[in-house]
Image (cartoon, helix red, strand yellow):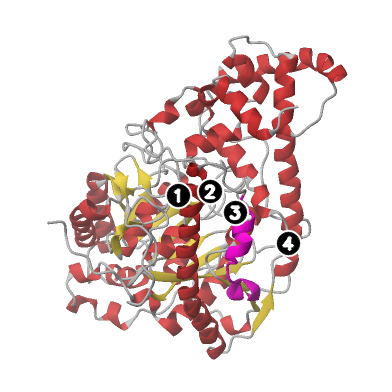
Amino acid sequence: MLDRRNFVKTCSGMGLAGTLFPGVLWAQAQAQAAKKITKEMIENAAAIADVPISDEYKEMMLESLNNQAKGYEEIYKLHIPNSVDPALIFDPVLSGMKFETQRKPMRISPPSKMAVAGASRTVEHLGFSSVRELAELVRTKQVSSLALTEMYLDRLKKYDPILKFVVTLTEERALAQAKKADAEIAAGKYRGPLHGLPWGAKDLLAVKGYRTTWGAGGFESQMLEEDATVVQRLDEAGAVLVAKLTLGALAQGDVWFGGVTRNPWNTNQGSSGSSAGPASATAAGCVAFSIGSETLGSISSPSTRCGCTGLRPTFGLVPRTGAMALSWSMDKLGPICRTAEDCALVLDAIYGPDGHDRTVQPAAFNWDANLDWRKLRVGYLKAAFERKPDEQQETAKEEPPTTPAEQKKREERKKRREAARARAEYDRKYNEAALAKLREMGVNLVPVEMPKFPYDAMVTMLTAESAAAFDELTRTGKDKLLTSQKDYDWPNTFRTARFIPAVEYIQAARARRMAMDAVAKVFDKLDVIVAPTSGEQLVITNLTGNPAVILPNGLRGNDAPKPLTEDPGDFQNAGGPGTPTSLTFLGKLYGEAELLAFARAYQEATGFHLQHPVLAPAS
């Protein structure tokens, strides 16, 4: 029986790299133009599935396997759109779990002194104002929606050549919406704190009359003649859509068909992703707020890199209707803003069932800016704050190099680990200062640990679902049109996913359920958990569906380690002097009101969210 390495070589020899149809066996049949599975193919497939099969059973399997293969072809003929979800539905709510369902009026904070005295400032200076501040200025007619919209459109045009965060300006739509907002407010019809405020949408949200590109080569002209539910709800709130903003191709990273979206704090760096444009534009003061999405870090990572406040809501709180699907059991939509309260005001407008996204629960989000956060039970991931990377252990995990090329790759990986470790060591003081500040605020931080499970192995579900979401892209070979083609990019991931057995997908789902039960027990005793933004918690809470707020936590000094590379498309080009650090607060399922209230208290005590980059226009 072939070992895995030899089987990969066998697959390459058969031309599988270019065909990789669903099911390893069917892929082999297609590659050999046989359209029929043989005993030899079973042997090869069994090797990669790690399932020993006696020779006497192989003959028995042939008829059933060939019949299954015919079924694959019948399903291909359906040309299933990305918008069709599977019959199986992921639900993070466990037996006996309860959440608030009664909606109550929002209780927002009183207007700031800046908002009250806003008329003394020029419109241009309002670019970095919070949603709460802008809402008061628009409500009291100190600033018109049209003036704000024109200002943000000007800034988008001015800084896009540097930051590359715009896919499509929705200028005509925006100006019409702004004029309507001003007319309604003048007539006494005030819709709420988002009325008249310009915002940007990650370009995986469908907007009628405008292209929805998913950031991907081959989809540059795609038109979806519908408005995503989130877009509809923000329209109803009176918000003004000014731009469709970039995302890494098919929601990975910051590399899209138009280039690399940049970090406003260091334009030699990418903004991270995949909510690359929303984070960059928000940080650069080019929209009042934006909507991003997260499957496994796509709000967290760019919010960190760009110094924004990002909210990844509980899975099943915000409907994803009209949004590109990547993983039906992990995709989430959420706001990227300047403050925690801004996130609350946006979330209030977009959450709740829409009758289409079957994962959305009837949970209520009741924002109260006056909630007594001192009564919340707060834990912190003690080991995560103290953990140091062990170079010897990491090196020991690698197989010894057998060729000069493998040796070169090993040396490159070592350099990258060293750079990442130096950055982590430098950033440790910001995490320690955060814990000290929380204690100074009177918070009793309870040390806690997340349960131990093979979480990375559960990400198999995301990989399999994403390959299914873009099945036809792989089978037709159009994945070659995607801009980035490295080993960690989607084209290679989708092909590799063809080798995930259905049984192992189900086993990963069962392990995930065990992890959900265990993590729920941790949150039974806590309302908020403080965590470093990087690390295992990101994978854990995306799998369990728990919400997270990512907060700016200070700027690195001039003594910060410089990035290993200056290539903006290289994810290792991160950190360095003058760039933001972040902190993450994790919450109970559907516990966003408490989570955001706690985050708001931390922001008021620190003021890190008030810092913003200084940009020069393109020459």
Picture residue at 64% right of the left edge, 43% below the top:
460
Q: Quadrant of the N terminus?
A: top right
User: What is the distance, in whole Å, between disc 3 and disc 2 at their CAs?
Assistant: 9 Å
Element at badge 3? loop
Q: Is residue 28 above or below residue 170?
A: above
Residue indicated by mark 3: 315
Q: Please name the residue shown 28% across and 57% down the image.
A: 181
Nearest-to-viewer mark from 2 and 4: 4
State yes or no: residue 504 in magenta.
no
Pick the front one: 394 or 617: 394
* Place of residue 232 in the rendered image (x, y in percent of width and height, measured from the top left): 42, 47
Marks 1 and 2 in Cβ contact (< 8 Å) = yes
In the image, the segment drawn in magenta is: 381-398
Disc 2 from disc 4: Cα separation: 31 Å
How crowded pointer 3 is (Cα within 10 Å; few <14, some 14-19, many 20+) is rated as many
Label 4: how many Cα within 10 Å (few below 14, some 14–19, many 20+): few
